[in-house]
Image: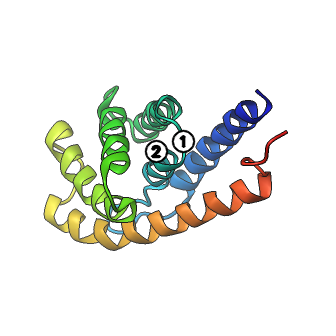
Amino acid sequence: MRNSLLVLAFSLVVLCAGAGAEELLPKILGVGFPVLLASTQVFAVRCPLAAAMLFALAAGGIEDSLSSLPPMTSASFFLLSMAFARRADLPHAAAFLTYPAYQVWLSAWTGGVGGGVFGRILVALPVGAVTAFAVGWTIRMAERRAALGEQG
């Protein structure tokens, strides 16, 4: 029980820090850093299914509110991304490919995200890869420091 409360508190901290980072980090040609999407994929691989789904819904809802998107636009993609990361044999490759796919998803559902979708995809490839690596490493290090895997 104690460990599940620690995981809940850790998840809330990751959501708040991810939302703050997405707002404060600069946009490169209109493409931001997908901190919440990358953290969703990390939690998808490291948590049970129910916890990963709740985290994906919460992160997607935060992303929708930060970006002024219609409800469930990002949350539905985050759920699909979570399922893809859980099923993929290479979760790092899944993290690399999902941010460009998210740009296509946004252009399909909103129609006016600004800028050409192909230019956004070209920028999203390296930005998504760097963000996925940095977020994954940071969450793993923070989990070790918080001793989430310890029994007690």
Figure check: 53 above or below 44: above
Q: Residue furthest front?
A: 151
The structure's colour scheme is: rainbow
Q: Could you tell me the amino acid type at mark 2?
A: Ala
Left or right of residue 60, residue 125 in this image:
left
Whether residues under marks 2 and 1 lie with C-beta atoms below 8 angstroms apart, the answer is yes
Mark 1: which secondary structure?
loop
Front residue (pair 10, 102): 10
Q: Is residue 140 left or right of residue 146?
A: left
Query: Tag 1: Cα neighbours inside 10 Å, few (<14), some, or many (≥20)?
Result: some
Where does the image place residue 151, in percent across and percent down from the top left? Answer: 80, 42
Q: Position of residue 113 (x, y in %)?
A: 24, 48
Give the residue type at disc 1: Cys
Residue at 23% from the left image edge and 44% from the top image edge: 106
Q: Which residue appears at 63% of the width and 49% of the height?
A: 17
Give the position of the N terminus as an image quadrant.
Answer: top right
Quadrant of the image occupied by residue 33: bottom left
Q: Residue furthest right?
A: 152
Which of these two is toward me, 38 or 120? 38
| Residue pointed to by mark 1 | 47
Q: Position of residue 82 (x, y in %)?
A: 38, 43
131 lies above or below 60: below
- Give the Cα distance between marks 2 and 1: 6 Å
- Identify the residue under disc 2: 44
